[in-house]
Amino acid sequence: MIFGIGTDLVENRRLVRWLEQPALLEKYFSSLEQDDVKKSDHPAASLAARFAAKEAFGKALGTGLRGLRLRDIQVVRDPHGRPFLDLAASAQRALPSENTRVHLSLTHEAEFSLAFVILEV
């Protein structure tokens, strides 16, 4: 059963200045996420997609990001490149049940990045 659906759209250029602010990156993104972004051919879009995923997760919960630490919502990729959310601490506790499945889809173009999250219980 679907518990919640969330989506978020981020303008890539908004995140360009974040790439030059290590303290800001450290506050919102894990070191693994930061490393992936730095390796990307399109770092601002990669960062924007990750930020959109965190926002979409909060929307799928129905609570927004209130009470969540953004670093606890980590976007990672499986060996085939498929993105998924690795949830820790505050994000894990926010799930409706311990058996909740989290589905993530990301896309980005030249100007925008989009994330879509479905929570299934």
Image (cartoon, helix red, strand yellow):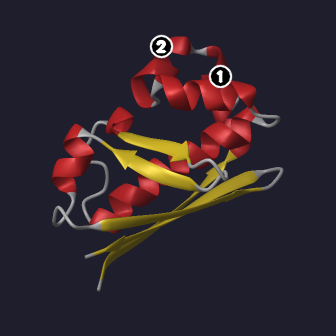
Residue at x 17% of width, y 61% of height: 98
On the image, the x and y values in percent for residue 55 come to: 43, 52
- Asked whether, in this view, residue 88 is left or right of residue 49, the answer is left
Q: Say which amino acid is labelled 1.
A: Leu
Check disc 1 and report the residue beneath it.
19
- Asked whether, in this view, residue 70 is left or right of residue 110, the answer is left
In space, the residues marked 2 and 1 are separated at their CA atoms by 10 Å
**Considering depth in this image, is 83 or 37 the residue closer to the camera?**
83
Which picture quadrant has residue 90? top left
Check disc 2 and report the residue beneath it.
23
Q: Secondary structure at mark 2?
A: helix
Is label 2 in contact with label 1 (beta carbons under 8 Å)? no
Quadrant in which the C terminus appears: bottom left
Q: Residue furthest front?
A: 79
Q: Is residue 108 above or below residue 116?
A: above
**Considering depth in this image, is 26 or 92 the residue closer to the camera?**
92
Q: Secondary structure at mark 1?
A: helix
Residue at x 71% of width, y 35% of height: 44
Quadrant in which the N terminus appears: bottom left
Q: Say which amino acid is labelled 2.
A: Ala
